[in-house]
Amino acid sequence: MRLAKSFSDQELIEKISKKKDQNTAIRQLYQEHYGMLENYILQNSGSHEEAADLIQEVMLVFVKMVSDAKFRGESSIKSILYSICRNLWITELRKRKSTLNRQGIFHSNSEETDEDVTKAIAKQESLNYVMDLFDRLGEQCKQILKLFYYEELPMKEICQKLDFSSEQVLRNKKYKCLKTLNESVKSSPEIYKNLQKALRHE
Amino acid sequence: MSNTFDLEQLERYLYGQLNAEESTLLERELEQNPELKTDLEILKLSSKGAEASGWKELIKATQKEYLQDRSESKTPFQVRTGKNITLWMSRIAASFALILVGAFAVLFLSTNPSSLESEFDLRYSTPVLRAGENSLSMMEQAYREGNYSEVLNLGENSAGLEPKGKFLLAMSSLELNQPENATSLLLEIEESNSKLNQNAFSDEIDYYLAKTYLDEGDFDNAQIRIEKILDDQQHTYHKNVSKLMLWKLKILKMKS
């Protein structure tokens, strides 16, 4: 997993936001920051396995912040990753309240909290529910939706790639898949509650 | 889902693909119809969820690869040390090879017949004898005094010279830069030794023949004599020749 060249923070942000060579960008994030993030978890009562699970979540929150233009490099990538990691880990530890009290690993009130990070984490929690529902779709549906929303491929290309007889057949299939997902989302009490709350505060 | 707008229209609205009239209509409907608004938000969430799933897949694969690489690089210390030693040994070997190549290049460029001839710097010295002790005393006296021409003159008039006399003539020829004459005289002594089963000046003959052959440019015969001296540890001149001289001789052969 050696990288021939190291990119600057700004270059990494651009690669992620434009989805251009994002694989290289994510690889560099791991090489440069995984150790630091893991160390934080290990020093705060976490295990290697817990660190591995949490760091995946940290990366996902970070990528979403960049995609939604909530992070444009105002601070260093290192500090934003650290902030996301700390917030997520503290949330996790709060769920284990009694342990937290005993070990005194509290998130100090005086410690600065990044509002954007807190919001991004909250958004990601809702999105995690949707991702779980997405995983329950059939393989073909997942492929179509991923190629369309993540890879951002045009319908014509997806049609060729997945061997559909026509774009119209693919379009129909795509909306059918999307409809299934939407219905699952709508019937999910956790998501629906958050959604209604968000709409009320709009 | 609202009856007025379907999923496809909502998505086209999100991507800004509706025309102005359709957009206005939809926006009006959104204001009045909370169900449609919820549908639109759910559509946004679903599409973001699908996109995030793509990112999650990439992140998961990258993390797996990263952790695998990391665990491989954390192999036992001894193994890493072994690898390092091998690496360093090969680097040292490469450096030595480079130095050898460089040294060989210098040797190759700097070696010429005269540089090698200068290494045959042993001049033959006659033992000190009292005057009139034997018939060769005059030649020896002249040789000691450095009067090599006189030695050659004395030798010319002396038919049937003994090996010692011939040897003095050979050495004087060498001093007077007449290597062919010296070679011929030394070979005569060697032949006589062979016939009479004697060893007169045999070690000296090897050493000085190597020198005369070198002077004459006969590198093959010079090499034979040097190898003979090198191979015989009891040879009088064993310490006066070296493998380096042999290398230089081989370089001269290559150059010629």
Image (cartoon, rainbow, N blue to C red):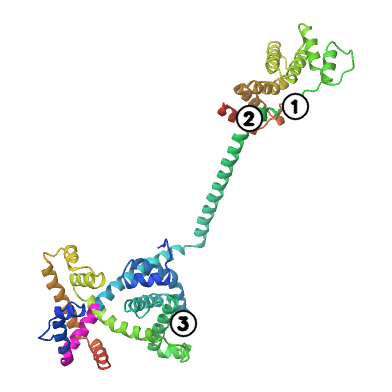
At a point 50% along the width and 59% down the height, the residue shown is: B80
At a point 68% along the width and 27% down the height, the residue shown is: B117
Circle 1 residues within 10 Å: few <14, some 14–19, many ≥20: few
Q: Position of residue B77 (x, y in %)?
A: 51, 62
Q: Position of residue A65 (x, y in %)?
A: 34, 79
At a point 16% along the width and 92% down the height, the residue shown is: B32
Q: Quadrant of residue B118?
A: top right
Q: Is residue B255 above or below residue B143?
A: below
Q: What residue is disc 1 on?
A: B122
Query: What's the mark number on residue A44?
Result: 3
Q: Position of residue B242 (x, y in %)?
A: 67, 32
Mark in the foreground, 2 or 3: 2
Q: What residue is disc 2 on?
A: B112
At a point 67% along the width and 26% down the height, the residue shown is: B229
- Which range is magenta? B29-47
Q: Position of residue A159 (x, y in %)?
A: 16, 65
